[in-house]
């Protein structure tokens, strides 16, 4: 399960070491899985920022809807898991 930076700063080094895979290949795969999970949220947030900067109201509304859906999906998956 992914941990937030705030949670990571509260953990001591020993408990962190217990949760991380020792094999570098497994660690990389775990990181890739987390990035894949976050990709829709990051993409929608980027589109919203670009639409805002370009003053594209319709694009901003569409991007914010996509961002809301991506966050809802991410929260649903994390709560189910």
Image: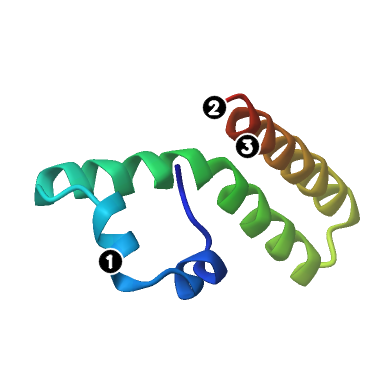
Element on which disc 1 rests: helix
Contact (Cβ within 8 Å) of mark 3 with mark 2: no
Q: Secondary structure at mark 2?
A: loop
Which residue in the structure is indicated by mark 3? 74
From the viewer's perspective, is the residue at label 3 or at label 2 nearer?
A: 2
Please tell me how crowded label 1 is: few (under 14), some (14-19), or many (20+) other residues with Cα within 10 Å.
Answer: few
Rendered location of residue 29, percent (x, y): 23, 41
| Residue 60 shown left or right of residue 15 in the figure | right
Alpha carbon separation for disc pair 3 and 2: 11 Å
Q: Residues within 10 Å of mark 3 (few under 14, many from 20)?
A: some
Q: In the picture shown, does residue 57 fall above or below 21?
A: below
Q: Which of the numbered marks, if any, corresponds to residue 6?
A: none
Picture coordinates of residue 46 (x, y %)? 62, 58
Cα distance in 3D space between marks 1 and 2: 25 Å
> Going from the N terminus, do you reach mark 1 or mark 3 first?
1
Query: Which residue does the image show at 76% across and 71% down from the upper left?
Result: 53
Towards the viewer: 42 or 8: 8
Badge 3 marks a residue whose secondary structure is helix
Circle 2 residues within 10 Å: few <14, some 14–19, many ≥20? few
The disc at residue 14 is 1
Quick one: quadrant of the C terminus? Answer: top right
Q: Quadrant of the N terminus?
A: top left
Query: Residue placed farthest to the top in the image?
Result: 80
Q: CA distance from mark 1 to mark 3?
A: 29 Å
Write down the residue under mark 2.
Answer: 81
Question: Quick check: marks 1 and 2 in contact, CB under 8 Å?
Answer: no
């Amino acid at each position: 399960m992914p941990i937030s930076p705030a949670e990571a700063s509260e953990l001591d080094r020993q408990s962190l070491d217990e949760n991380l895979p020792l094999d570098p290949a497994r660690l990389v795969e775990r990181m890739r899985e987390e990035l894949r999970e976050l990709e829709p949220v990051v993409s929608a947030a980027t589109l919203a920022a670009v639409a805002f900067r370009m003053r594209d109201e319709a694009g901003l509304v569409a991007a914010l809807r996509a961002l809301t859906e991506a966050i809802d999906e991410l929260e649903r998956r994390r709560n189910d898991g």
